[in-house]
Image: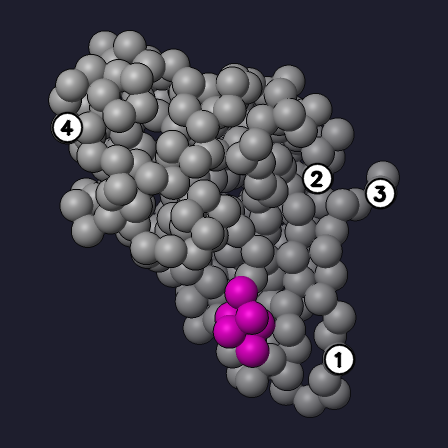
Amino acid sequence: MRRLVTIFLLFFSCGSYVINRGNVIRISGSDTMRLLVSKWAAEFREANPGIDIRIKSEGTANGIRALISGKADICAASRPLRAAEVRTIAEKYNKIGMSTLVAKDALSIYINPENPLRNLTLDQLEKIFQGEVTNWSAVGGLDEPILVLTRSSDSGTYLYFREHILGGDSFTDAAVEKDRTAEIVATVLENRNAIGYGGLAYGEKIIHCYVNGVAPTIENVKNDSYPIIRYLYLFTIEKPQGIVKQFIDWVLKDGQKIVDDVGYIPLW
């Protein structure tokens, strides 16, 4: 089976990385991938009862830090490695890491079911999240103030949204930060004027807003018509070996059915 992987070549001759030789795989990283990684871990444990998987979902940036410090064997990430992170890995390990694509995701815009709006343009989203538009009436909604919700700056989803929707500019100072996607979903459900964002697999009871007239559905992600699409990754310091390789190989084969079951888009 052909693996969809992005491999950063290991080009230094010195330095070393201590590979996990036991029966525990430590995965740290993306909150967006929390549901997916937890399901992968449960299914993999069942198929391989001698192997344990320990998960921390504290954001992509924290996961990368855990990987670099040796506290994680795998980082689950909702964005690519940044140049500074690759440089840090190179300086510490004389390697620049390996990245494996494991799923495709839509970045969904969450609104309350009582909000009459069902579609926003990318331009309107930029103005809302930057604070230029502060009342729903300015985009065709009710004459009520907009409550903007965002993830913390450690989140890969936060960085993706800032880079791709805000053009690298800052979020409005009035934005309320939430550590987890589930907290954004809960707040949107509690407040009809709230708006937030996160992975497509979250928030069954909220409205996943159309963007530029296109629904954030699995089919529209597959055909690339939905405008906010990204890949999800597993990072390792070097080419996976042992039980880490066993797990990642399983994710790319049997684990792709779980990607579909959870609500993300499998690679094939």
Label at residue 61: none
Q: Earlier in the sequence, mark 4 or mark 1?
A: 1
> How many marks are shown on the rendered structure?
4
Q: Amino acid at mark 1?
A: Phe
Q: Earlier in the sequence, mark 3 or mark 4?
A: 3
The residue identified by callout 1 is: 11
Label 3 to label 4: alpha-carbon separation: 50 Å
Figure quadrant of the C terminus = top right
Which circle marks residue 2 in the picture? Answer: 3
Residue to which mark 2 is pinned: 252
Q: Which mark is residue 145?
A: 4
Give the mark nearest the N terminus, 4 or 2.
4
Seen from the viewer's position, the closer of residues 84 and 243 is 84
* Disc 4 residue crowd, few under 14, some 14–19, many 20+, Cα 10 Å: few
Q: Position of residue 187 (x, y in %)?
A: 20, 28
From the viewer's perspective, is the residue at label 3 or at label 4 nearer?
4
- Amino acid type indicated by mark 4: Pro
Label 2 element class: helix
The residue sitting at 38% across, 35% down in the picture is 125
CA separation, marks 2 and 1? 25 Å
